[in-house]
Amino acid sequence: MKNIAVLILVFGCCVCQRPPHGNDDTLSLTSINQKVADNAAKITLLEAKLLNAEREVLELRSLTAGKPQVAFSAALMKSGRGNVGPFNTDTALKYNKVFSNTGNGYNPSTGIFTAHVSGTYFFRFSMFNNLSPTPNSVVSIMKNNERLVSVWDTSGTDSNDMGSNAVVIPLEEGDGVYVQLLATRVIYDDEWKYNTFTGFLLFAA
């Protein structure tokens, strides 16, 4: 009986001295619940941002009616003044003062507008000269290698003349449009920006 009593006492002491594992489990579960709540809050915030982004996209689409936006306008000289030309060959004019270039179709390094969207476009250019005593001015809008419309002026009693022309044409993706100065001819420009080249998409094909 004494041995049984001793064993019961020892077992009871061991049970009393066990570490409180239940408390650790409770703390661990609380930590997990907190992390889940934090992640849920982050997901809710992300969802709200996505909804706002979707709403902004829808608003932009409603303003543009989902249509591609293409437009540019540029003047011949950024600064300075003087004649451009004469050249030995027909030469594409490089309009370096870019006012706008929505759609990035116009390249000031070449003077060429390249259609990235097939459709019907409007183009216009203006020409100014200071002919006395320089040669005639002949300037044309070109589609690829095709001459479309032109402005021509010759020296006379007056020293300054100005003209403009415009055209509405269909373009396929990849077509190029530019303003060409004929060989041996000149135009004049200064800080007043007389010579300009403008174009925009009327409607896509």
Image (tube, helix red, strand yellow):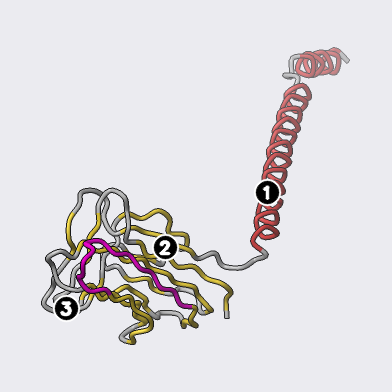
Mark in front: 2 vs 3 = 3
| Majority secondary structure in the magenta region | strand
> Residue at horizontal 20%, vertical 70%?
155
Q: Earlier in the sequence, mark 2 or mark 1?
A: 1
> Residue at horizontal 43%, vertical 62%?
72
Position of 73 relative to 152 (above/below) = above
Q: Position of residue 181 (x, y in %)?
A: 24, 74
> Residue at horizontal 56%, vertical 72%?
202
Instruction: Specify the label residue 50 is tagged with.
Output: 1
Instruction: Specify the label residue 183 is tagged with.
Output: 3
> Residue at horizontal 31%, vertical 66%?
127
Badge 2 density bin: few <14, some 14–19, many ≥20, Cα 10 Å: some
Q: Is residue 174 magenta?
A: no
- Distance from disc 3 to disc 1, alpha carbons, whole Å, reads 57 Å
Q: Quadrant of the N terminus?
A: top right
Label tally: 3
- Going by the picture, which residue comes out furthest to the front? 157
Q: Earlier in the sequence, mark 2 or mark 3?
A: 2
Badge 3 density bin: few <14, some 14–19, many ≥20, Cα 10 Å: some
Instruction: Specify the label residue 17 is tagged with.
Output: none
Q: Position of residue 140 (x, y in %)?
A: 32, 77
Position of 92 relative to 77 (above/below) = below
What's the amino acid at mark 3? Ala
Query: Closest to the observer: 42 or 34?
Result: 42
- Distance from disc 2 to disc 1, alpha carbons, whole Å, reads 28 Å
Badge 1 density bin: few <14, some 14–19, many ≥20, Cα 10 Å: few
Q: Position of residue 123 (x, y in %)?
A: 44, 72
Secondary structure of the residue carrying numbered label 3: loop
Q: Which residue is mark 2?
A: 104
Q: Give the extent of the magenta segment.
A: 153-167
What's the amino acid at mark 2? Asn
Q: Position of residue 146 (x, y in %)?
A: 34, 87
